[in-house]
Amino acid sequence: MSSEMDLDHLLRANLMRVFNERDAAKRDAAIAELFVADPVMYEPDNVVEGRAAISAVAGNLLEQFGPSFQFAPLAPAVGHHGLAVLRWQAGPAGGPIAVTGSDAAHMLDGRIARLWVLLDPPAA
């Protein structure tokens, strides 16, 4: 995957099919499709290694923030040469935005190899 469209598709699929998916089996299947065999995700306070651990983090986030919490992309991802960034926001459906940030990903052979979760500072 080298085009910006492919990078956008991959990062949007990660947001919608992994981080918005409450069904663990569906989330695991999406991760198997979207990520390399041994991915690493870098969160502000944690390094998460492996597909199963990434799935667990996504599931825990959704459980922690309630049944209507969801992530939504803010604009198409931008990127080239295997690096892409997708801006997003998250919060309860129909409610206030709780957090905004970006996912920056290094792609390898059309899959996510490394994912950095960057959180914006809280609004003043």
Image (tube, grey):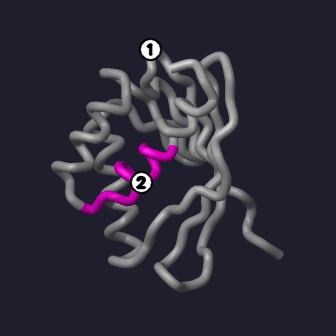
Q: How dense is the environment of label 1, judged by Cα within 10 Å: few (below 14), some, or many (20 and up)?
A: few
Q: Is residue 1 above or below residue 52?
A: above
Q: Which residue occupies the foreground of this view, 35 or 121?
A: 35
What x and y, as percent, mark residue 35?
Answer: 37, 29
Q: Sequence order check: which comes first, mark 2 or mark 1?
A: 2
Q: Which residues are magenta?
A: 12-22
Q: Residue furthest bottom?
A: 95
Question: Does the magenta run of residues contain 16?
Answer: yes
The residue lying at 47 percent from left, 79 percent from top is: 93
- Image quarter in which the C terminus is found: bottom right
User: Given the image, on which type of amino acid does mark 1 rest?
Assistant: Asp
The residue lying at 50 percent from left, 62 percent from top is: 71
Cα distance, mark 2 to mark 1?
21 Å
The residue lying at 57 percent from left, 45 percent from top is: 117
User: Given the image, on which type of amino acid does mark 2 rest?
Assistant: Met
Q: Which residue is mark 1?
A: 109
Q: How dense is the environment of label 2, judged by Cα within 10 Å: few (below 14), some, or many (20 and up)?
A: some
Q: Which residue is mark 2?
A: 16
Q: Is residue 90 above or below residue 41?
A: below
Magenta stretch: helix, strand or loop mostly: helix
What x and y, as percent, mark residue 53?
Answer: 31, 41
Q: Is residue 62 left or right of residue 73?
A: left
What x and y, as percent, mark residue 22?
Answer: 27, 62
Q: Which residue occupies the foreground of this view, 75 or 99?
A: 75
Give the image quarter of residue 98.
bottom right
Disc 1 secondary structure class: loop
